[in-house]
Amino acid sequence: MAVDRRTSRDIRSESRLTVMRTLLAAGESTRNRLAEDTGLSVGTVSTVVSDLLKHGIITETGQFGGLIGRPTTGLRTNADRGRVVAVYVDVEEAYLAAKVYDAELGELALAEATIEGRLEDADTVIDAIERVLCAALDRARTNRDDVLGVGILLPGGMRRPVKEAVAVPNPIWLHLDRLRDRLRLPVVVENPLKARATAELWLGAGRRCANLVTVTLGIGVGAGIVQDGVLTRGSSDSAGEWGHTLFTFDGRLCRCGRRGCVEAYLGVDGIRQTLAEIAPEHPLTAEAGRRRFLEALGELPDREATDTVERTAHYLGAALTDLVALVNPEVITLSGWTARFLCEHMLPIVRLRVVEESPGDAAADLAIEISSIHDPGMAGIAAVALERFMRDVGLVTTKMLPAI
């Protein structure tokens, strides 16, 4: 069996991404300061900076420094190097969105579309993606020649179609080449878990720590895992399906077909089931909209709603404790609808339970927080598209990116 070993090329790749992310966070810096902030040697930073300057990804800004000491050349990321486009496809809601970002991951324009009927076949989805992407480019006044890459945010498996179309219709995964041919642009496809983790690396908690987990709490539940500054993918690119780990033996039926999954208790439908168990006649149990259900649940002052939120907090704390035992992160960030509408109420219970139940000192210094990133899924897939561009020009190894 072949052993996957890091090569010197992989190490240079990681150094380039580290410098890029650090410079993006700083806004403006110098070679010496980048060496201090990243822990890399001055020689390594100088080599990396030369590589990034060569491809126009960063730019020099002239003399940087105050009146004391010797001025040195400033550096910053080059926002005008090109544009990247993030496209989100929500199959269940038949909704699409496209955002155009500059090369510093600054948002420039948004276009949205709702499709009549269901997104059940590849042609329908490909047509819709092309339309919403073109609309976003028009709003950003961006020519296609300026696009460095397009990131498509799709739930589902990356290597093979899922058994049931609970997240994304199988034909889309089977026809990604057709999508690339239609768009005539560099395309990379990622699932939301890994996109959100990438967003944390570029724009969030990953700037201050090397080991983190970003947990998505919405219709589905999952975890993007970063260890030693590198996104964990697994042998078939399916790492992070924490929502389908066992929460309780022979418990609630999960939409994946298994009983007792974390998602059956922490997904939106699971939270609704918890409310139904506490108060079967509660009016919110009949609320059709999942997002509206969570928003209303967080606003209601009645005892049944409060009990539901508190019980969900205990479920989340217990489930996160297993994650802490497995990967020992420095930070856990929470994102998704549930994080937005309920986690402010749940965090005290969650933190206490994780600290009390984690093995040894695994959670002694652990931070659990709501993600600070606006729209982490879209920001993350834009960052993935930027990384894809860096791969295409030879700066990043393929091991850092989705296989497709």
Image (spheres, helix red, strand yellow):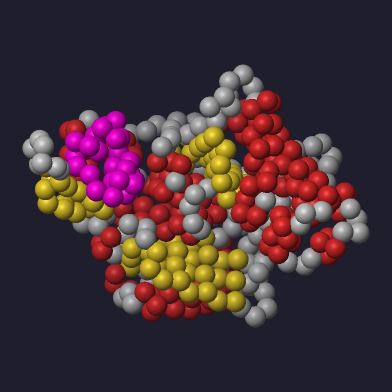
Q: Is residue 160 above or below residue 347?
A: below
Q: Residue at x 16, y 53 (%)?
A: 61
Q: Residue at x 32, y 59 (%)?
A: 103
Q: Residue at x 87, y 59 (%)?
A: 282
For this orientation, the residue located farthest to the right is 281
Q: Is residue 329 left or right of residue 353?
A: left
Name the foreground residue: 307 vs 252.
Answer: 307
Residue 355 shows in the view: yes
Q: Is residue 318 left or right of residue 141?
A: right
Q: Quadrant of residue 69?
A: top left
Q: Is residue 110 above or below residue 395?
A: below
Answer whether residue 30 is magenta in the image.
yes
- Measured from the top left, where is residue 373 in percent x and y? 48, 52
Answer whether residue 320 is magenta in the image.
no
Q: Main secondary structure of the magenta part?
A: helix
* Segment tinted magenta in the rendering: 15-40
Q: Quadrant of residue 299?
A: bottom right
Q: Is residue 354 left or right of residue 34?
A: right
Residue 178 shows in the view: no
For this orientation, the residue located farthest to the left is 70
Q: Is residue 188 above or below residue 367?
A: below
Q: Residue at x 54, y 34 (%)?
A: 367
Count of all numbered marks drawn on residues in the image: 0
- Measured from the top left, where is residue 281 in percent x and y? 91, 59
Name the foreground residue: 122 vs 278.
Answer: 278
- Measured from the top left, where is residue 191 in percent x and y? 54, 54
- Measured from the top left, where is residue 129 in percent x and y? 50, 73
